[in-house]
Image (tube, rainbow, N blue to C red):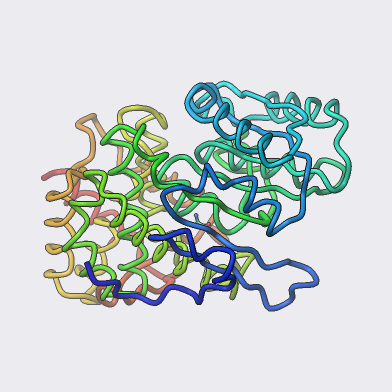
């Protein structure tokens, strides 16, 4: 397994040399006075080094852990024991009920009340231990508590390790849609321990893997080839492959986020597959029928199909990605329900990324050559849905 894309330089080789095999990816912002830079530490013994890493990097001694009812029995005690042994005081832990349905105002209020009741001060930390729901909500709570206290992400799903824990998008869902209330608020450290992925179902791993392939498709054809060669090992639980791919994904995301924290330009590329995928998630009810990463995989195929239809990329690119998704067990067909293309189109137009009613899409001029398109004819988008849903 030859590393084929550049991982950002190790910024603290001395104290972190023992995290092998492991990686450190630095998220470096141009204006560190407004947005401090931070590290993402990736490896296979990170949870048992949490206290050391937090002390070395942040100097913090007190924290509140936010987790959910799935992760709490799996990892919270281990984290607390490690922190306590390292002389770190856990003021309290907060367990939110698991599931996207709980990423709402009511739970945010409960989390904030409990954080404030724990007697925090401005030097205390919030530690988000969990997947995307916990990370998004704990990050938002951290941005609001006392007008902003530091937080550390310890992502426990592959999707969170390669996407949601990095980049500082925090949010809750409202009746107006997913992630419609939130902030850009960067964590001060991300600790990604791939051994935590061992408790995930094969389906959850595959769903997270779709976001990994996305980075190759956006701007790194060599990484896509790595995925084609090693994706099978990764989804089957190979920790070295996971460390490499999480590192490469975080490095790719870090580069984009550092250039465009607030998504006024290049960050939109990270939405490859998401506008089509979001429409599928809405009509399938954001549930077990189609989980987020699976919707992204289908959305990527739709974006590639549209790109091929418009003559932007060869049909072979679509075929290669389709074949790879089949090999790793990602869906290549949407769940078989009755689809109303008008509804799908309407949801695409309402997407947060839409501007002045125009559907913004990420299309490809080839594998590794994604770009933002704001002028795709809706007739072509509709035609691609028709083709995709009829086969
Ligand atoms: N998940 C896309 C982003 O962080 O911008």
Viewer-side residue, 245 vs 389: 245
Q: Position of residue 345 (x, y in %)?
A: 38, 48
Is 31 situated left or right of 313 in this image?
A: right
Viewer-side residue, 110 vs 6: 6
Viewer-side residue, 345 vs 123: 123
Q: Position of residue 360 (x, y in %)?
A: 46, 63
Q: Residue at x 47, y 40 (%)?
A: 156
Is 341 situated left or right of 130 in this image?
A: left
Is 100 situated left or right of 308 in this image?
A: right
Q: Position of residue 307 (x, y in %)?
A: 26, 69
- Which of the 4 image quarters holds residue 372? bottom left
**Where is the N terminus found, in terms of image quarters?**
bottom left
**Where is the C terminus found, in terms of image quarters?**
top left
Q: Residue at x 13, y 69 (%)?
A: 315
Q: Position of residue 93 (x, y in %)?
A: 69, 27
Q: Tell me if residue 322 comes above or below residue 375 in the rendering.
A: above
Q: Residue at x 47, y 56 (%)?
A: 42
């Amino acid at each position: 397994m030859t590393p084929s894309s550049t991982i950002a330089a190790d910024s603290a080789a001395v104290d972190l040399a023992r995290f092998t095999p492991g990686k450190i990816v630095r998220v470096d912002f141009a204006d560190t006075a407004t947005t401090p830079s931070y590290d993402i530490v990736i490896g296979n013994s990170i949870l048992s080094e949490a206290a050391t890493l937090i002390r070395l990097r942040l100097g913090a001694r007190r924290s509140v852990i936010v987790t959910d009812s799935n992760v709490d029995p799996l990892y919270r005690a281990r984290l607390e024991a490690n922190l306590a042994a390292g002389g770190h005081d856990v003021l309290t832990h907060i367990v939110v009920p698991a599931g996207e349905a709980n990423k709402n105002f009511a739970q945010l209020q409960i989390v904030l009340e409990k954080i404030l009741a724990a007697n925090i001060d401005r030097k205390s930390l919030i530690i988000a231990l969990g997947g995307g729901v916990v990370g998004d909500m704990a990050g938002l709570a951290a941005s609001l508590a006392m007008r902003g206290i530091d937080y550390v992400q310890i992502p426990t799903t592959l999707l969170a390790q390669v996407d949601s824990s990095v980049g500082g998008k925090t949010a809750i869902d409202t009746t107006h849609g997913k992630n419609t209330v939130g902030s850009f608020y960067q964590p001060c450290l991300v600790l990604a321990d791939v051994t935590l992925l061992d408790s995930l179902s094969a389906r959850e791993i595959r769903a997270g893997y779709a976001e990994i392939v996305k980075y190759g498709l956006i701007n790194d054809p060599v990484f896509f080839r790595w995925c084609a060669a090693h994706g099978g090992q990764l989804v089957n639980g190979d920790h070295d492959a996971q460390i490499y791919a999480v590192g490469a994904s975080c490095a790719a995301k870090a580069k984009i986020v550092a250039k465009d924290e607030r998504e006024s330009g290049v960050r939109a590329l990270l939405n490859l597959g998401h506008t089509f995928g979001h429409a599928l998630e809405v009509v399938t009810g954001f549930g077990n029928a189609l989980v987020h990463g699976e919707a992204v995989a289908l959305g990527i195929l739709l974006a590639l199909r549209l790109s091929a239809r418009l003559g932007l990329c060869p049909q072979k690119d679509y075929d290669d990605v389709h074949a790879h998704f089949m090999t790793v067990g990602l869906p290549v067909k949407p769940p078989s329900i009755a689809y109303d293309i008008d509804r799908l189109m309407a949801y695409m137009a309402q997407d947060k990324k839409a501007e002045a009613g125009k559907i913004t899409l990420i299309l490809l001029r080839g594998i590794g050559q994604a770009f933002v398109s704001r002028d795709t004819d809706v007739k072509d988008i509709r035609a691609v849905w028709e083709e995709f849903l009829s086969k």
